Amino acid sequence: MKVLGTDCWSFDGPARAMVESFYGTGDPAALWPTHLHGRKREFIQIEGLARLRDLPQGGAFTFMAFPVALADAGAAWCRAVADVKEPARE
């Protein structure tokens, strides 16, 4: 899988919990672990998606993301679109 999406603000836990874990253990892996996982295995994560419940349950749809290119940035926002095909009528 190359693209993961969520309607949450982040794939990682709450920022406060990550910071507390970092200061408690001194382990830098406690900070933004999902974001940093992309350095080991290539994937794109898209956060803050809306209306996911409107997608067909178990049905097919095409997902498209149109990112905004920012110079010298590792992340940016995108326009996320789901193309849901209506079933053919007989």
Image: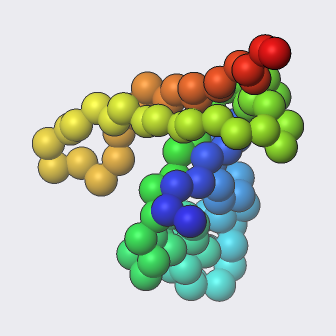
Q: Between 73 and 45, which is closer to the camera in this rendering?
A: 45
Which quarter of the image is occupied by the N terminus? bottom right
Residue 83 in the image: state x and y as whole percent.
57, 26
Q: Residue at x 68, y 78 (%)?
A: 24
Residue 38 lies left or right of residue 1; in this view the side is left
Q: Residue at x 55, y 79 (%)?
A: 29
Task: State the residue lying farthest toward the left.
Answer: 71
5 to 2, vertically: above or below: above
Label tally: 0
Task: State the residue lying farthest toward the front.
Answer: 90
Q: Between 60 and 67, which is closer to the camera in this rendering?
A: 60
Q: Between 57 and 86, which is closer to the camera in this rendering?
A: 86
36 to 58, vertically: above or below: below
Q: Residue at x 41, y 71 (%)?
A: 42
Q: Which quarter of the figure has residue 88?
A: top right
Residue 53 lies left or right of residue 62; in this view the side is right
Residue 53 lies left or right of residue 39; in this view the side is right
Residue 62 visible to an observer of this rendering: yes
Residue 55 in the image: state x and y as whole percent.
75, 29
Task: State the residue lying farthest toward the right.
Answer: 57
Q: What colouring method underlies this structural image? A: rainbow
Residue 16 visible to an observer of this rendering: no
Q: Residue at x 51, y 79 (%)?
A: 28
Which quarter of the image is occupied by the C terminus? top right
